[in-house]
Every structure is written in C-alpha cells, then in structure tokens.
Image (cartoon, rainbow, N blue to C red):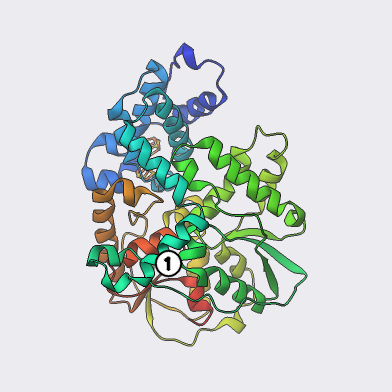
C-alpha cells in the first residue's frame, strides 16, 4: 500500500514503523472474514482493512476525528486478522501506534477521559481493587442478578509449595487475577513444583502494564514495566522462563522488549523478558506429564483466549497438554473468534461485548460440556457472567480441582 506521510510526522520513529506495516498490506480483505467486529457489524470501517485505511488516512492528512477513534475503539485488538493475513501484516502494532497518535490528535470528551482514568487508577492495583471486590463478595447473594453475575465467588488459593528447586521460572502474579481468582497462581506453583520447577513470585512485581498500554497511557505502562523489571532483575538470568497464568499479560510480556527499546536502563532486561516469556502451557508441554493425570471424566470445553491463539500462538500446546493429562475435551466452533472480554473492552463497548459473549458461549457449548476452561482472567470472568456451567482456569483442573 503506497503511503505519503504528512510532513508534520517527519522523523518520528513510530511513524516509520507504521509506514512499513502499511506498505505490507495488499488490500485483499481476507482478514475481514475472521474479524469479530466485522462479522457482527458488517461495516468495512469495523474490519481490519478499513481500520488500516483509517490509520493511513490519519498519517497522510495529519487529521483525525471522533469517527476514526470510534472505529478504532471498537477493535478488540484480538489479532485474529494477523493470523489470517497472508502478507504477514502486523495489525496489532499498527493499531497501537495509530491509537496513541490519534488519541493526541483528537482528544476524547471529558466523560470518556474520566472513565478511562478511573479504570487505570483502580483496576491494576490489587490494594484498591481487592477491598471493593471482597465487599462485593460479602453481599453477593443480596445483589441484583446482573451485578451478582459480575462478582466472582470468593476462592481460597490453597497452600503454596515450600520446596526449593534448581529449576526456576519467574511467575508474574498480576493484578486482577491475583485477587479475583487467587487459586490460579497457587495451582500453577503446585503443578510446577510437582514437575520439579520452582515458581518465583518476586516481591515488587505487579500489573504487567497492559491495561494502561491499551488505554494509551504509555508512560504509565512503562512505569509498570520498570517496576516488574526491577523486581525480576536478580533472577532474570538464571530463570528458565518468565510466565503468566493470564495470556493477556503473557502477550504484554512478549512486547516488553519493543516497548522499552529506547530506555537505556531497561532495554536489555526488557528484551530478556520478551525472549524468555513462555505460556504456562508451553512450559508444561516440554515436560513428562505422567504424574499429572487428572482423575475426572467431566466433558470440558476449551476456550483459547485470542492472546493465546493470535499473540502467543500457544493454543496447540495447551490443547495437547490437556489431552495428555486426560482432560476430555468437547467439540467447539469458531475458536478463532474473541469472546468480547478484551481487557476493558467489556466495560467500554458493552453492547458488542455482550453479543460476542453470547455467540462464543453458543460455539463453546454445542457439545454439552460440564465445564469451560480457559487461560485468561478476563475471558474467565466475562464468560462466567452468562455461562450455565462453571468457567475455570485450566491449571486448576490439572492441579486436581
Ligand atoms: S489480509 Fe492482510 S494484506 Fe489483506 S487486507 Fe487484511 S491486512 Fe491487508
Ligand atoms: S484485532 Fe480483532 S477486532 Fe481488531 S481488526 Fe483485527 S480481527 Fe478485527
């Protein structure tokens, strides 16, 4: 795709990256066929090719308005289009660059900015989010049905292993997951312990920065990244891998190297993290799993999050791990389509999010599963609000839960 970048963007590194990505697109439109928002709305501007044109127009004219932002806001950043694209267009990177620049060129109305700021102030901080969640859990039964469904039931994490192992991985504790489903990280630590691998959850680490990054608060996202890198530095060289039980966070970790490339104090550590980031399923896939056979015949539907399928590309590893340990997987449809969770998308684009959730649950439950398993806290909580069967993290099943 030929582009003529507006002179006011001359010399900007991210514009050069965007231009290269734009050039790689051959306008074929294959990507529209697997784009959830295009499938729902049928509007070219709500598909990847249309959004690419919108970003191109902005970079060429230097102008963008609320309409451009509206169509970019509706994008889930699920990256299904990247998997489909025959030309290898890095849509996710282009969308990130376009969004950040358009946010500055066409500022949002005050109410939208305030809501986004509130989400950033609240969600990535367990000390702020945790007490409210716990209060909601105490009065959960008394809440109106819609609200009750959005408050996950209280979980106990269970004991953490205390054995030390020469083999170690760094485990990102995360933010929402660590308080909403504390059993997930504990189950991962127990399963890894049984395989002779120690999961290091190092003090000082916290949110991966994805929420701030996706809400275009770049400086804040980089502060989260620096915090994590400071916490992990002592163990970074010796650890076999950096893992997260939430694939959304895993996808962000994979991007640390790119996002910190211009920071002389953190670039090297960030690129080490990206190189060592593996999904938990990939770590297990390389091990002898005979000690982990599950003792259940429960029919289980697997929902692979977009971040696992399209960003980390480890969905096959997860399916194989579950089959190897004896989980009975049911048939599902439309595995490439997003469930509509997508970080804060379910809060900022509720209508589209709800309709994608309904479509996903139908595709997951055609074979009458007794439970659904997934690999990302956002998908888990989002699907659980409407599923007729329990929705769990897969590692809990492997842990014997
Ligand atoms: S499939 Fe790839 S090359 Fe074709 S329009 Fe979509 S992004 Fe461009
Ligand atoms: S990232 Fe997902 S929602 Fe956005 S354009 Fe690509 S396929 Fe569509």
Question: Which one is in front, 270 or 160?
Answer: 160
**Quarter location, residue 280:** bottom right
Q: Residue at x 50, y 47 (%)?
A: 210
Of the pair 189 and 112, the residue shown nearer to us: 112
Residue 41 position in % (x across, y down): 22, 43
Q: Is residue 66 visible?
A: yes
Q: Residue at x 57, y 44 (%)?
A: 255
Q: Relative to residue 30, is residue 155 depicted above or below?
A: below
Q: Is residue 46 left or right of residue 316?
A: left
Q: Which residue is mark 1?
A: 134
Q: Position of residue 85 (x, y in %)?
A: 41, 42
Q: How many marks?
A: 1
Circle 1 — which element?
A: helix
Residue positioned 32% across, 59% down in the render: 334
Asked if the beta carbon under badge 1 is closer than 8 A to the nearest atom of ligand 2, the reply is no
Label 1 CA crowd tier, 10 Å (few <14, some 14–19, many 20+): some
- In the drawing, does residue 171 fall left or right of residue 236? left
> Position of 355 compared to 289: left or right?
left
Give the vertical position of 325 relative to 387 (above or below).
Answer: below
The residue at the point 41 percent across, 25 percent down is: 1
The answer to whether residue 323 is visible is no
Q: Nearer the viewer, residue 138 or 230?
A: 138
Ligand 2, seen in the image, is in the quarter at: top left
Residue that lies at the very extreme toward the top in this rendered image: 7
On the image, the x and y values in percent for residue 308 come to 48, 57
């Amino acid at each position: 795709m030929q582009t003529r970048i507006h002179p006011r963007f001359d010399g900007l590194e991210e514009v050069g990256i965007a231009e290269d990505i734009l050039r790689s697109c051959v306008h074929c439109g294959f990507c529209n066929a697997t784009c959830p928002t295009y499938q729902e709305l049928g509007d070219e501007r709500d598909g990847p090719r249309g959004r690419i044109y919108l970003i191109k127009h902005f970079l060429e004219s230097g102008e963008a308005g609320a309409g451009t932002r509206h169509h970019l806001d509706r994008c889930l950043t699920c990256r299904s289009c990247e998997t489909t694209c025959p030309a290898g267009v890095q849509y996710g990177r282009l969308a990130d660059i376009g969004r950040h620049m358009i946010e500055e060129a066409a500022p949002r109305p005050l109410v939208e900015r305030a809501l986004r700021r509130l989400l950033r102030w609240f969600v990535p901080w367990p000390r702020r989010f945790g007490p409210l969640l716990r209060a909601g859990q105490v009065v959960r039964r008394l809440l109106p049905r819609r609200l009750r469904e959005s408050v996950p039931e209280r979980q106990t994490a269970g004991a953490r292993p205390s054995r030390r192992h020469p083999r170690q991985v760094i485990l990102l504790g995360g933010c929402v997951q660590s308080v909403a489903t504390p059993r997930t990280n504990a189950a991962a630590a127990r399963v890894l312990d049984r395989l002779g691998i120690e999961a290091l959850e190092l003090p000082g680490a916290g949110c991966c920065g994805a929420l701030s990054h996706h809400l275009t608060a770049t400086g804040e996202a980089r502060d989260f990244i620096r915090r994590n890198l400071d916490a992990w530095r002592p163990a970074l060289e010796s650890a076999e891998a950096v893992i997260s039980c939430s694939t959304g966070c895993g996808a962000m970790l994979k991007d640390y190297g790119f996002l910190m490339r211009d920071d002389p104090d953190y670039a090297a550590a960030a690129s080490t993290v990206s190189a060592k980031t593996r999904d938990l399923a990939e770590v297990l896939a390389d091990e002898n799993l005979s000690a982990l056979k599950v003792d259940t015949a429960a029919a289980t539907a697997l929902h692979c999050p977009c971040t696992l399928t399209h960003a980390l590309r480890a969905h096959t590893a997860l399916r194989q791990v579950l089959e190897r340990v004896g989980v009975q997987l049911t048939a599902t449809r439309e595995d490439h389509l997003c469930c509509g969770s997508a970080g804060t998308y379910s809060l900022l684009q509720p209508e589209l999010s709800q309709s994608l959730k309904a479509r996903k649950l139908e595709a997951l439950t055609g074979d009458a599963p007794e439970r659904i398993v997934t690999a990302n806290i956002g998908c888990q909580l989002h699907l659980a609000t409407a599923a007729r069967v329990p929705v769990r993290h897969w590692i809990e099943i492997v842990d014997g839960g």
